Amino acid sequence: MNRREILTAAATTVAVPAALATPALAQGVMEWKYPTSFPANAPGVGTNATSFAARVNAMAEGRLQLKIFSSGDLVPPFAVEDAVQQGTAEIGHSTPYYNAGKNPALHFFTTAPFGLSANEQAAWLRYGGGQELWDEIYAERDLIPLYSGNSSVQAAGWFRKEINSVADLQGLNMRIAGLGGEAMRKLGVNAVLLPPPEIFPSFQSGAIDAAEWVGPMLDQAFGLNKITNICYAPAFHEPSAALEVIVNKDAWDSLTPDLQAILRSAAEACVTESLSQFEFFNAQAFAQLKETGVEFRTFPPEVIDALKGAVAEVMEEQAAASTQFARVKESYDAFLALAIPYADAFTAPSLTQRG
């Protein structure tokens, strides 16, 4: 799969009305519009969306069909949640922090800097109260959130020049998402959030000096290694990154209990699939990138310390400005404090001992 194939989804959709009062019916089949924030044929993020649709369509046995719309085909990449809320689409696929401008607490349901791993994120959502908080926040906009996948730890970004000190960050134009972007701003970075299809052309043209996207598999697929051979890892700001399926509440309520269970089961199956896919193909792409001369580096301690300080400032500011951010942060931090000693005693030495 080349970059052009990834960034240009197959043209299989037709013009549709701006909004729907009721689900479309064709010979007794409910057909739901299902836009995603990502190119639908991109590995990892795109296949998470298409796999969910395929599972639902198969299990529903002709009663419900999801018609997927690739990034930008029905609505802009960052407008999927709005489309589902407004009824332009009954269901959508995205990641929560793309809508953090409406509510900063949504950052936690994707990831937080120096925060939970993918496995820990799933544990917090399922057993630590995270899902209940997520449900409560989305209910305010008549939305149902389903956790559908995770990329696991990401890359910190691709840079045209080495980062040997905090001074090297100052003045850089960088594509970076989430709270990590806010922290980078405090260190003098001009952080911008570009939709996925715009990352490569902006990097190639020189409009940005650095870009973080996901990790080896997707970064290679999007061609970021063609711009520079310097990649920093791991991502301080994305130790994991969750994907979501969003359902319009009225559309959800129109389903029979078994169809609701099918949506939930399909999302849960896609979580396992995404973790396996990212793990396998990231390892494969990492080896390929190294063979072609890509240098994977880590930020020096000075930069990590500065980022930790900047993240602490951002968290304090966001919590002071939003009671919901503060409330979700309290829950997230409580499980993080519980998880760190266990990970330090079991996970970290287990990985170290393998080497």
Image (cartoon, helix red, strand yellow):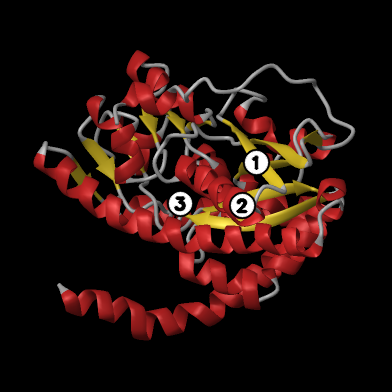
Q: Secondary structure at mark 2?
A: helix
Image side of residue 210 versus residue 261, left or right: left
- Quarter of the C terminus within the rendering: bottom left
The three-letter amino acid code for the residue at tag 3 is Leu
The residue singled out by tag 2 in the image is 56
**Image spot of residue 316 (x, y percent):** 67, 57
The residue singled out by tag 3 in the image is 307
Image depth: mark 3 or mark 1 in front:
1
Mark 3 Cα within 10 Å, few/some/many (few <14, many 20+)?
Answer: many
Give the numbered dot on residue 66: 1
Residue farthest along the top direction in this orientation: 205
Q: Secondary structure at mark 3?
A: helix
The first of marks 1 and 2 along the sequence is: 2
Image side of residue 26 versus residue 307, left or right: right
The three-letter amino acid code for the residue at tag 2 is Val
Q: Residue at x 67, y 25 (%)?
A: 75
